[in-house]
């Protein structure tokens, strides 16, 4: 059983799970892009720290709701681990919100989509995890698409 947005999808319906997850990604990226464009046009995006604070507050609320819906047990990481991840997330969000003042939304989404490359590099160099050839090919096509865009 897989749970997606509170919906329970049986394991034998992997196609349905794929469609729900893929559709959700596109829907929420469209909603996010629309919200960023609205904030930019409303001249709210110039207050990058405030927008970041609101985003982090929403993350906290949604995380709490998710944990309650899943009846999750105690966390496995230390408070310091969560503090480090939280700091990096806030820094990433803040810099992204500040860049929105200078970049249009499609360009911003293009850069966000290219996060795969540094993640693969960190996995290789820091965690010594190897990826199969298919993942390298997919990354190559992603970078090629970004360059051609």
Image: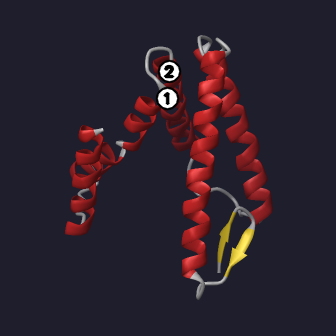
Residue 120 drawn at (x, y percent): 28, 51
Q: Secondary structure at mark 2?
A: loop
Residue 21 drawn at (x, y percent): 58, 63
Residue 132 shows in this picture: no
Going from N to C along the chain, the mark reached first, 1 or 2, is 2
The answer to whether 38 appears left or right of 135 in the picture is right
Residue 1 shows in this picture: yes
Residue 129 drawn at (x, y percent): 26, 61
Quadrant containing the C terminus is top left
Q: Nearer the viewer, residue 35 or 129?
A: 35
Identity of the residue drawn at 29% across and 41% down: 146
The answer to whether 87 appears left or right of 103 in the picture is right
- The image shows residue 119, relative to residue 86, as above or below, that is below
Q: Nearer the viewer, residue 114 or 105?
A: 105
- The image shows residue 103, relative to residue 88, as above or below, that is above
Q: Which residue is mark 1?
A: 105
Q: Is there a contact, CB below 8 Å, between mark 1 and mark 2?
A: yes
Q: Which residue is mark 2?
A: 100
* Label 1 Cα neighbours within 10 Å, binned few <14 / some 14-19 / many ≥20: some
Identity of the residue drawn at 59% across and 88% down: 12
The answer to whether 11 appears left or right of 72 in the picture is left
């Amino acid at each position: 059983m897989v749970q997606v947005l509170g919906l329970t999808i049986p394991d034998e319906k992997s196609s349905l799970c794929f469609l729900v997850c893929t559709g959700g990604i596109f829907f929420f990226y469209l909603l996010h892009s629309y919200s960023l464009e609205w904030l930019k046009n409303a001249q709210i995006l110039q207050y990058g720290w405030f927008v970041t604070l609101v985003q982090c507050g929403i993350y906290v609320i949604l995380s709490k709701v998710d944990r309650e819906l899943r009846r999750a047990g105690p966390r496995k990481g230390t408070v310091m681990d969560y503090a480090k991840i939280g700091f990096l997330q806030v820094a990433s969000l803040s810099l992204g919100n500040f860049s929105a003042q200078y970049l249009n939304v499609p360009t911003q989404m293009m850069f966000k989509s290219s996060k795969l490359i540094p993640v693969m590099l960190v996995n290789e160099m820091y965690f010594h995890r190897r990826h199969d050839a298919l993942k390298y090919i997919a990354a190559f096509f992603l970078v090629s698409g970004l360059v051609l865009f």
